[in-house]
Image: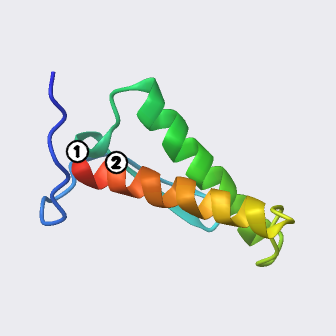
Amino acid sequence: MARRKYDPNEKPHIVRDFYDGNTHIMIADNYCVKTKAERDAILDRVKQIWINAYLGGRTLLNSPEERAAAKAREEAELAAYAAK
């Protein structure tokens, strides 16, 4: 089954709406991922965002090479997602 392209103008179909502390979480079933690879890429990105927020803007990537590789991976993931 071909994955349909993301449409930013499409209204989300919210199937679950709840709070976890101060965080408002809404789950839309028309934006759910279908493959393990998509899920893993999203979870990796969320993990990096959380770590960066937790560390107050500091990063776990110590060397310039590590930072450049992480940026290249992120750009490749975004390009792959945009191409779908």
On the image, the x and y values in percent for residue 37 come to 46, 30
Residue sitting at the far right: 62
Q: Position of residue 39 (x, y in %)?
A: 47, 35
Task: Tell me residue 82's x, y (percent).
Answer: 27, 55
Q: Is residue 58 above or below residue 29?
A: below
Q: Residue furthest top?
A: 1
Image marks 1 and 2: residues in contact by CB distance under 8 Å: yes
Q: Neighbour class for label 1 at 10 Å: few (<14), some, many (≥20)?
A: few
Q: Is residue 26 above or below residue 61?
A: above
What is the spatial separation of the Cα atoms under label 1 and label 2, in whole angstroms? 7 Å
Is 75 or 64 nearer to us in this picture?
64
Give the total of numbered labels.
2
**54 left or right of 22?**
right
Q: Residue furthest front?
A: 65
Q: Is 30 positioned to the left or the right of 44 in the image?
A: left
Residue positioned 44% across, 53% down in the render: 76
At label 1, which amino acid type do we have?
A: Lys
Going 66% across and 65% down the picture, which residue do you hit?
68
The kind of residue on which mark 2 rests is: Ala
Identify the secondary structure beneath mark 1.
loop
Can the viewer see residue 1 in this picture?
A: yes
Residue drawn at point x = 76 percent, y = 59 percent: 66
* Tag shown at residue 84: 1
Which residue position is annotated with label 2? 80
Residue lying at 51% horizontally and 42% vertically, measured from the top left: 41
Q: In terms of depth relative to the viewer, which is nearer, 71 or 10?
A: 71
Q: Quadrant of the C terminus?
A: top left
| 55 shown above or below 12 | below
Most foreground residue, 29 or 62: 62
**Splitting the image into 4 quarters, where does residue 19 fall?**
bottom right
At mark 2, the secondary structure is helix
